[in-house]
Image (cartoon, helix red, strand yellow):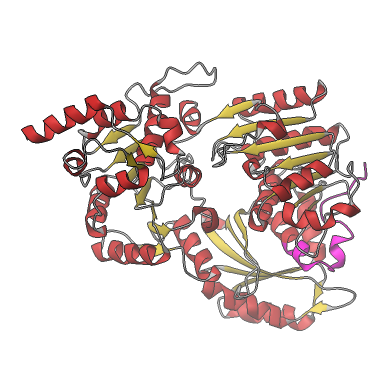
Amino acid sequence: MIGYDSFLTEELMKGTDWRAMERAVARVMSHCGWNDVKIIGRRGDGGGDILAKRKVAEGVEKIFVVQVKAVTGTRYVGPDALQEAVDALALYGGDVAVVATNGDFTDSTKRRVQELSRHGFDCRIWNGKFLRELLQKWPNEHSEKRSPRPYQSKVINDSLQKYRQGGKAVQFVVATGLGKTTIAAEIVSHLRKDGLSRVLVLCHSQDLSLQLEQSFWPQLEKDVPTHVFFDGIPPKRFNGINFGTYQTLVNYLPSFEPNEFDVVVVDEAHHALSNGFLLCLNHLKPKLLIGMTATPWRGDGLSLNTVFGDPVAEVSLVDGMKMGYLAKVSYRIYCDTIDWQGVFEQDQAKSFSIRDLNKRLFIPQRDEAMIKDTIEVVSKTPNPRIIFFCSSVEHGKRVADLVNLTGVLKCRPLSGISRVERYRVLMEFSTGKIQAVTAVDVLNEGIDVPDVNIIVFLRVTHSRRIFVQQLGRGLRLSPNKKEVCVLDFVSDIRRIAEILTMDAEAREQSRDPFATLYFPHGIVQFENTGILPFVEQWLQDITSLSSSDEKMILSFPPEVQSEESTRHHSQ
């Protein structure tokens, strides 16, 4: 296996690939003690390529805004780059402006740093020599390397054992927030020591491939190179780890031998059954194929087991709570607007589709009323940090305005704004300058703030996968919270079904040897208690209902019709 002193290879430091250089600087910062490192460089980035936080003198946390300049040959970086970084400070609300390069700086740039310092600006310039020496001072292991938790170790060991006993594929299902990427990175690290050094990590979106590379970094030693391939840039033939999309790989398949990669990892493996993805997986013949997902459900009913085999482990959100690795949930369902009488007194003998039932049951509630209920909970919550999940960009902006009008919270929308503004809002939310944000598509907002302790679902269209991802945003542990409170202004009978499935799992006595907590009273409470007997009797198969199409026809059991009708007439 070819060895490297560090991921700052000679090829990289030539400066011919600006994207790779940008990500290398971010990895240096991540490895050497900066936290919350975000790579933001793209057209319209306002002069900032990387945002990161670091505690400096007296424990004060400062935001670093970094401009990265890749240069080739004997070119030097001039003072214009420094000015771009300084301009970006105001845009991103930063404290320290940095210009980093693989090369070096002109004398005029060095003089400009001193001038700006006299005017109160904290500016720094990092050349290639500085980056190499900084990385050399730090241990081979990442500053935030995570030791596998007991359940993660079991998944890792079971996966390796299956491979060493002749298995060609493994699959594990691990819920959001429980470290499935850490598990995969640890498996890859073990396999690299066995000589399986050529690794390919595939997914279905470019943004996810970028996130995956960054998520692997803490588990990798600094001599393991990584590479992200984009359209126009193929995977590298090297003893490192490639990250990219199957859509890009398809274009290069003919040029790769089936055994080109020793290990292939598929993230969000529920996408692997699409035609293009299967084309890639059918061509590649790695020594081990790894499939991982937090949400294995598919609307077409196809099983991932046909590609990856039976899962070696399935760890749910509730499992995570019982083991103490996810925050305890207090889930409150607001059903005061449900029109029971409208269902039972009209067409009682008729069967309803889910769409018809939702239309008849759920009366639209005004945003003002829902926010009033939320503010009441906020008033009883120390250091509230809130995400409002909304149904559209316009809805998110309207909710943010209404929240700000209460005077209790500062709230900003994350959706429908520029990338620069989004990163600034995320930084303000992360550091506590604002207490609330509104969001539409959790998969694109980049929300990763462990201190979130209130999640509010406002008229969100039902999707089991997105629901679980959104809920997971509030389950991260933090020293500043004991539990997360979820306020669900439910508008879909399938959502109730999904939540009751989780509640039933929470009430069960776990046989998991890693479980330390139990919830004999469940984790769900209905603000309108009259709904629960109805739902428990009527939803005979809540697991299948939660992922059902809204056209599916449902029927009331006769005994429920008569009981509810009698109850309403007697009121």
Residue at 78% of width from left, 43% of height from top? 281
- Magenta region: 1-22
Quadrant where the C terminus sits is top left
Seen in the picture, residue 47 relative to 17 is either above or below; the reply is below
Residue at 60% of width from left, 38% of height from top? 179
Quadrant where the N terminus sits is top right
Residue 568 relative to residue 377: left or right:
left
Q: Is residue 32 visible?
A: no
- Along the line of sight, which residue is nearer the eye, 307 or 524? 307
Residue at 77% of width from left, 53% of height from top? 135
Q: Is residue 18 magenta?
A: yes
Residue 316 relative to residue 249: left or right:
left
Seen in the picture, residue 102 relative to 56 is either above or below; the reply is below
For the image, the number of numbered tags is 0
Residue 236 relative to residue 366: left or right:
right
Seen in the picture, residue 132 relative to 380 is either above or below; the reply is below
- Along the line of sight, which residue is nearer the eye, 296 or 512? 296
The percent coordinates of residue 89 (x first, y second) are 56, 73
